[in-house]
């Protein structure tokens, strides 16, 4: 257990001079019970936007990837200022666990006892001090100004806490607060790399207890992920798309393009439906199902959990090239509409129903489909770098209902596929309960003969770290993708 903790990589942002003196829109009350709105000093806009986004996540259970673009647009923030606000927002949310432990020690009180507006401002200030190149005096003074505007009575307290935070760098704080890795490796990694202990434990188990590799995964989880585009086959060539956006073709998926910057929604090929935003790992598992060898007819494909439509878009484009037709199932009406938008112009029929209704819904007959994708609802632990707040919201108690749903959906897929047909079970989670346990249990309970197909040859040649098969687990630190799991089953 004596693995040394790898030094954390830091990706900093330079401080941006305050811009404008427009009124702050946060709407927070002054203190615990007050309703009066204090006179607020001018604040620089990037920090103000970051505060609003972080506060919305904690106050309203908002999702950062949805709320932040809205606030940036409303505030008219672009370029370097928008990048700095984004860095502060996502960095603070990723490192929340460690920041809270440090703030608790520096303040001498549990962070739960700090007034929420002051607490979120302090988190942003501590992130600047420990993870960016913002000068300490600027990080402290700007945060004190922010606290003064949202919780005036806490300005002096904030100043004292942040000055104490600034007495150590991040490695110094980890050395002080984290338990020894030799006696408590999970606790040490959890505090050092800001993940809940149960998630660290799940990652370590999925990586066969390798602490060094677990640490590398946690570090990668805390990095800002690149935006991946999917060039839809038959509609745009990935080289052409890469040239248009000034990016590079993906390392593994033949359809992937790495976007170097800017808003993907502004890319013309995305606007007109020739491409879409999709992690390279998601592209790989969808393409693996489409490319797996299959005897007999191959014209009826099924995506059993299609929302919001990324994999259905890729499968629909491949189906168009091969004379096949995709039925895309989504239980939620609003997500079904997203699937319809994502697959417009492709040979795709969207069915708004529960995927478990195979055999009961006439649109989902048993033994009818040649290829079936089950992109099952899951904890999403494989995409924590893209959804940083999820690591703090998910709990072990989420697993039993999710794994039950996963087994039921995979059982429905095995009813829907014809004899000799293929089912791909996919989750964006490496948790063994959601991967190996779910797929083996569902196959056992299905009552039909099922063979596992070795998924490794279905991925591009030369991909490292695919394990011993027959299933495949992708990893951010190995492959640069979300942690997607893939099992391919052939019905006997």
Image (cartoon, grey):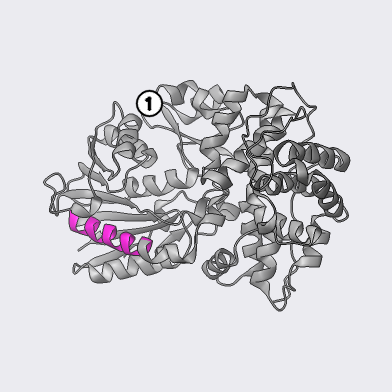
Q: Residue at x 71, y 46 (%)?
A: 118
Q: Is residue 267 left or right of residue 288?
A: right
Residue 216, image x, y percentages: 65, 59
Q: Residue at x 63, y 64 (%)?
A: 213
Q: Does residue 395 sit above or below 482 in this rendering?
A: below
Residue extending furthest bottom? 183
Residue 362, image x, y percentages: 11, 46
User: Which residue is tagged 1?
Assistant: 235
- Which of 338/469 is in front? 338
Q: Which residues are magenta?
A: 402-416
Question: Can residue 170 be seen by looking at this rendering?
Answer: yes
> If the image is split into quadrants, where does the C terminus sit?
bottom left
Q: Residue at x 60, y 54 (%)?
A: 477
Q: Provide the secondary structure element on which disc 1 rests.
A: loop
Q: Is residue 128 left or right of residue 233?
A: right
Question: Can residue 248 be seen by looking at this rendering?
Answer: no
Residue 33, image x, y percentages: 63, 46
How would you rate the neighbour count of disc 1 (Cα within 10 Å): few for under 14, some for 14-19, many for 20 or more? few
Q: Does residue 265 sit above or below 403 in this rendering?
A: above
> If the image is split into quadrants, where does the N terminus sit?
bottom right
- Which of 454/196 is in front? 196
Q: How many marks?
A: 1
- Which of 352/167 is in front? 167
Q: Is residue 322 left or right of residue 383?
A: left
**Secondary structure that dominates the magenta span:** helix
Residue 184, image x, y percentages: 68, 75
């Amino acid at each position: 257990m004596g693995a040394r903790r790898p030094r954390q990589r830091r990706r900093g942002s330079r401080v941006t001079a305050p811009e404008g003196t427009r009124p702050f829109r946060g709407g927070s009350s002054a203190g615990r019970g007050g309703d009066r709105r204090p006179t607020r000093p001018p604040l620089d806009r990037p920090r103000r936007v970051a505060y609003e986004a972080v506060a919305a996540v904690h106050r309203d259970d908002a999702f950062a990837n949805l709320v932040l673009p809205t606030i940036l647009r409303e505030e008219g923030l672009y370029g370097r200022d928008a990048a700095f606000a984004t860095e502060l927002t996502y960095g603070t949310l990723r490192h929340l666990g460690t920041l809270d432990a440090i703030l608790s020690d520096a303040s001498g009180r549990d962070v739960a006892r700090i007034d929420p507006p002051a607490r979120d401002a302090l988190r942003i200030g501590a992130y600047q001090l420990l993870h960016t190149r913002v000068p300490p005096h600027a990080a402290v003074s700007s945060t004190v100004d922010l606290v003064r505007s949202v919780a005036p009575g806490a300005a002096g307290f904030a100043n004292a806490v942040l000055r104490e935070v600034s007495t150590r760098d991040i490695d110094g704080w980890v050395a002080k607060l984290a338990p020894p890795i030799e006696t408590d490796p999970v606790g040490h990694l959890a505090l050092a790399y800001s993940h809940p202990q149960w998630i660290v434990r799940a990652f370590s188990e999925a990586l066969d207890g390798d602490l060094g590799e677990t640490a590398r995964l946690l570090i990668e989880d805390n990095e800002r992920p690149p935006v991946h585009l999917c060039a839809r086959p038959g509609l745009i060539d990935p080289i052409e798309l890469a040239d248009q956006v000034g990016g590079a073709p993906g390392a593994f998926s033949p359809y992937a393009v790495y976007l170097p910057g800017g808003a993907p929604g502004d890319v013309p090929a995305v606007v007109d439906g020739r491409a879409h935003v999709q992690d390279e790992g998601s592209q790989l598992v969808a393409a693996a199902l489409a490319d797996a060898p299959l005897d007999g007819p191959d014209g009826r494909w099924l995506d059993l959990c299609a929302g919001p439509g990324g994999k259905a878009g890729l499968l629909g484009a491949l189906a168009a090239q091969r004379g096949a037709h995709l039925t895309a199932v989504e239980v939620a009406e609003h997500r079904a509409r997203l699937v319809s938008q994502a697959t417009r112009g492709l040979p795709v029929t969207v069915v708004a129903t529960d995927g478990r209704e195979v055999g009961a819904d006439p649109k989902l007959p048993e033994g009818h489909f040649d290829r079936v994708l089950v992109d099952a609802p899951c904890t999403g632990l494989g995409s924590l770098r893209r959804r940083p707040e999820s690591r703090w919201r998910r709990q072990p108690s989420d697993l039993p209902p999710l794994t039950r749903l996963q087994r039921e959906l995979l059982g429905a897929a095995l009813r829907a596929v014809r004899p000799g047909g293929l089912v791909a079970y996919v989750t964006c989670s490496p948790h063994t309960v959601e991967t190996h346990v779910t797929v083996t249990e569902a196959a056992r309970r299905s009552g039909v003969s099922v063979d596992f197909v070795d998924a490794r040859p279905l991925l591009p040649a030369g991909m490292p770290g695919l394990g011993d098969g027959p299933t495949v687990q992708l990893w951010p630190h190995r492959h640069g993708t979300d942690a997607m799991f893939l099992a391919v089953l052939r019905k006997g």
